[in-house]
Amino acid sequence: MDSSKLAVKFFLKDGSSFDHHTLVPLFHQWIQTHALADHLLIDVADYRHVQSGPGTVLVAHEANLSTDAAENRQGLLYARKTPLEGNLADRLRLVFQSALQAVSLLESAPSLAGAVRFRTDNPIFRINDRLFAPNSEDTFMGVRPTIEAFLTKLYGGPVKLTHQPNPETVFEIRITAAGSPTADELLKRL
Amino acid sequence: MWDAPGMMRIKIPFGGLIPPQMNVLAELAEEYSDAICHITTRQDIQLHFVHIEDTPALMRRLAAVGITTREACGNSVRNVTACPLAGVCRTESFDVTPYAKACAYYLLGHPDTQDFGRKFKIAFSGCEHEACALVAMHDLGGIAATRIVDGKVQRGFKLFVGGGLGAVPHQAKLLMEFCTDEELLPISRALGRVFARLGEKKNRNKARLKFVVAKLGIEEFRKVVEEEIRTMPEDPSWRKYFDQMQDYREEPVMPPTHLNGAARPEGYDEWAKTNVYPQRQKGYAVVTVTCPLGDLTSDQMRALAKLSDRFAGGNARLTVEQNFVLRWVSESDIPSLYTHLKSLGLGQPGAGTIVDITTCPGTDTCKLGIASSRGLAGELRERLAAKSMEIDQSIRGLRIKISGCFNSCGQHHVADLGFYGNSRNMNGYTVPHFQVILGGMWLQNGGSYGLTIGAIPSKAIPQVVTRLTDRFVKEKQNVETFQDWCKRVGKKELKAMIDDLAAVPPHAQDPSFYTDWGDPRAYTIGDMGMGECAGEMVSQAEFGFRDAESAAFEAQLLLESGDYQKADHKAYEAMITAAKTLVRIQHPDVPNDPATIVNEFRARFVETKLFWDKYHHGQFANYLFARAEGPDTRYTQGTAHQVAEEAQLFIDAAHKCHAKLLEQSQNLVQIKL
C-alpha cells in the first residue's frame, strides 16, 4: 500500500467544543509562529456554514487540519496530503505524531482556556486514497498487521480495529483502545 | 519555501450533473481538496487547496465520467451556462440545454478559439424576461425564440454580443434578431474568429469582446461578423454536434403525481414557498437545494447523488446563484425529499431570496480578492436568516451579490444590493471597504446594471443593508420595485442615506473596523498577487487605473442621465486619478491636490516623454492639461461628452505608459542579470 494520504481523527470529549471565534485567530497565530513541527502552515478556511463539514480548516502544505464534524461528531482531523518517507509503519508514526501534536497544542492553548479536550481511546484512521487503498476487505487485510502492531505499541496494549468495507467511502478503521492517555503521553511513546 | 496550493476549476456545461459525476466530484474533493465542492457563479465546481502533483490523477478521474477541465480558465471559451430550468420552465420558448451542450463541445479545443487575448463567456436562456442565464452580461448570449416559416415552427435565438461585467460593465448588444438553430454553431465560430483577430492581445484590461464591440459600434461589428461568416473556411464538424442535439433526453424516474393535501413535515411549507418550482410538465417540480455560500461537503454531494437517482432520475443542475437543483421530482415525493435534505443540513428555505447571497471566493482563496466577500456574505446570511420570518414581503425577493474585488465574479452589478471589495487608507491603516452598488436588475437576463453609490467600511455593510431595505419598505409606492425606487430616489439621496456609515472610528476606539469579516488579523492587502479568477498580476497602479475607469464609467452614466456638469467633473476626476496613479510610481506621497498632480505629471511624464505616443505624441496628455485649466462652463451634452471620451482615451494612454514602464524595468532587470 503505497500511499501517504493517511488521516487520523481524534474526537472531542463530551462537554468539550470548538469555539470558532477563538479558533480562527489561534490558527492564524500558529501560521505566524510555525507552531506545528515540519509543517508549512498556509491559510485558514472557514466552513462553519456547512453542516457536518470540515468546520475551520488550517491548511498546510503537507496536510489539512480541520475541526471535522462529519456524522455530527466533532473532532480534530489531520489529513496528510504530501508524500512521506518510509514504509507504512514509518508513515503511521509521522501522521499520528503530527495529529497528536496538534491535539496537544489545542488542549494547552491559553486562548481556548481548557475548553477543548480530546479523548484518545476511539480515533478513526483513514487512507484517503481510493486509487491505492479502496475500502475493501483486501486492503484491510493488507494493512492490518502493521496498523495493529503500531497501535498496540502506542497504546501499550491490544486495540480493537473495526472495518466496514464500502466501495463508496474512503478506507477507514475505527480504533478502540482500553484507555485514553493524554496526547502528550502518547507523543512520548512515538 | 512557499508552495501555495491551487484551485481546480471544473467546467460543467449548462451546470448539468449526473450521479456518477457527482460521486467522483465528492471523492476528489475528499482526497485532493478540503472535502468541499464549491459551486461558482458560472455553474462550475471549484476545488480549493489542490496540489499540482495531484492534478493528473484528478483530471483522469474526471475524464472517466465525461468531465474535462480544459478551458475552464485562461484565454478561452469558458463554461457555457444555461438556465437551470431549461426544458421544464413554464415560460421558455424551448429547451436550450442541447444547444448549450453542443456549443460547449463544438468550441472546446476548436482551432478558432485558441488565440484569444482574454476569456469568452457564453450563456443561453429560454426566456427573455426572467433572469435565466444572464445573457446581457455575456460575450455571446442566446435567448430562445421561434418563428413560423411555411407553416412550420422554426427554432432560433435572439443573439447578443459584447456584454460583460468587470470594472466597466457593458450591456450586451443585439447582434441578430433571429439566428436559426442551424446557424448557431457556425456563427459562434465566426465570432470566435473575429474576437481572435480583432480582440486586444497585449492589454488584458481591454481584451474582452465588449471592447471590440464598443470600439467598432454594433453596426460595424455586425458587418464584420457577416463578412466572416461568408468568407471563413468550411468546417463541417459543427453538423455532428448539431445532429447529436436531437438525442438529448431527460426522463423522470417516477410517474407524475400531486400532493393532494398529503401530510407535510415541519418546516416544509415555508421551504416549499421558495425552493419548489412546479414544472411545465404537470405533476413534476424542480427542487432547489440551497447551498450556503455555494459550498457542499463531499458527504452531502454523495447523498445528493443518491437523492438525484432516487427522486429526479439523475437530472440535476448547478445554478449561477450557487445552488443545486433536482428536476423531474414527482410532486408527492417532495415532502420525503425535503426530509432527506433536512437531515443533510440542506433543507434551508430562502432560495432566490435576500438570504440566498451570491459571492465569489474573495480573499479566502483568490489572491485578487481585496476584501472578504465570503466573510461578509456569511455574516449577512446569518443575520438575515435569524430574522427571516420578520422580513417584509417586498424585500424578501431582493438579491444580494458580493465580489471580493472589481472583477465582478460575484456578479454584483446585477444585484439589487451589490458590493465589491476595495480598501482605503485611513488613520494610518488600511481599512477593508466595500463599494455599494444599488438597483441592478437580475431579471430580464441581467437587464441593467446598478449605480455605484460609494465605498463603506466592510464592518458597516450590514447596517447599509438594514438601512436601505428599511427605507425601501417605508417609502415604496404601490408595486414599485427596488430598482424603480433607487431610480426615483436618485443616487444623491441614496448616498446621503449611508454617508455617515463611511466614517471609520479611530483604531483605539474600535479596532474591529481594521479587520475583515472572519479574519481577526490586522487587515492588509500585502498578500495579493496572481488571481484565481482573472489570472493576472494586479499591482497597486492597476488598482488606481481601475478607480479611474470606474470614475470614467460614472461620468458616462451622468452623461446619459443628462447631468452634464457632474459628468464633466467626474470625467476630470477620472483623468486626475489616472495621472496620480502614474505619478505615484515615482512619487508615492504625491498630495491629492489636482493642481499638484497635474504639475507633477507634466514634469515627470510629459516633459520626459515617458507619456508619449509614437503617432499621437502628447495629444492625450493635452486632454488633461486643457481640462485642468478649467471646465467649459456651458456644460452641454456635447462638451460633457467630449470630456468623457477624452477621459477614457487618457486612461488608455496611461495604461499604455504604465505597460511601457514595466517593460523598461524588466529589461533593466535582465541587463543587471
Image (spheres, rainbow, N blue to C red):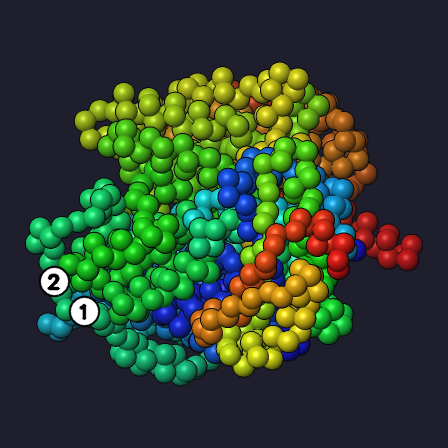
Residue at image position (59%, 47%) is A118
Expressed as whole percent of the image width and height from the top left, the position of residue A49 reads: 45, 44
Residue at image position (50%, 25%) is B460
Residue at image position (21%, 54%) is B335
Secondary structure at badge 2 equals loop
Residue most extreme to the right: B672
The answer to whether residue B180 is left or right of residue A170 is left
- Residue A126 seen from this side: yes
Please identify the quarter of the rendering in which residue B81 is found: bottom left
- Disc number for residue B257: 2
Please identify the quarter of the rendering in which residue B507 is found: top right
In which chain is the residue bearing label 1? B
Q: Amino acid at mark 2?
A: Thr
**Closer-to-camera residue (B659/B246):** B246
Secondary structure at badge 1 equals loop
The answer to whether residue B363 is left or right of residue B90 is right
Distance of mark 1 from mark 2, alpha carbons?
8 Å
B386, above or below B140, in the image: above
Expressed as whole percent of the image width and height from the top left, the position of residue B631 reads: 56, 23
**CB contact under 8 Å: marks 1 and 2:** yes
Label 2 neighbour load within 10 Å: few <14, some 14-19, many 20+: some
**Closer-to-camera residue (B369/B641):** B369
Label 1 neighbour load within 10 Å: few <14, some 14-19, many 20+: some
**Closer-to-camera residue (B380/B215):** B380
Residue at image position (38%, 25%) is B466
**Closer-to-camera residue (B349/B39):** B349
Q: Quadrant of the N terminus of chain B?
A: bottom right
The answer to whether residue B448 is left or right of residue A37 is left
- Disc number for residue B254: 1
- Disc number for residue B317: none
Q: Amino acid at mark 1?
A: Met
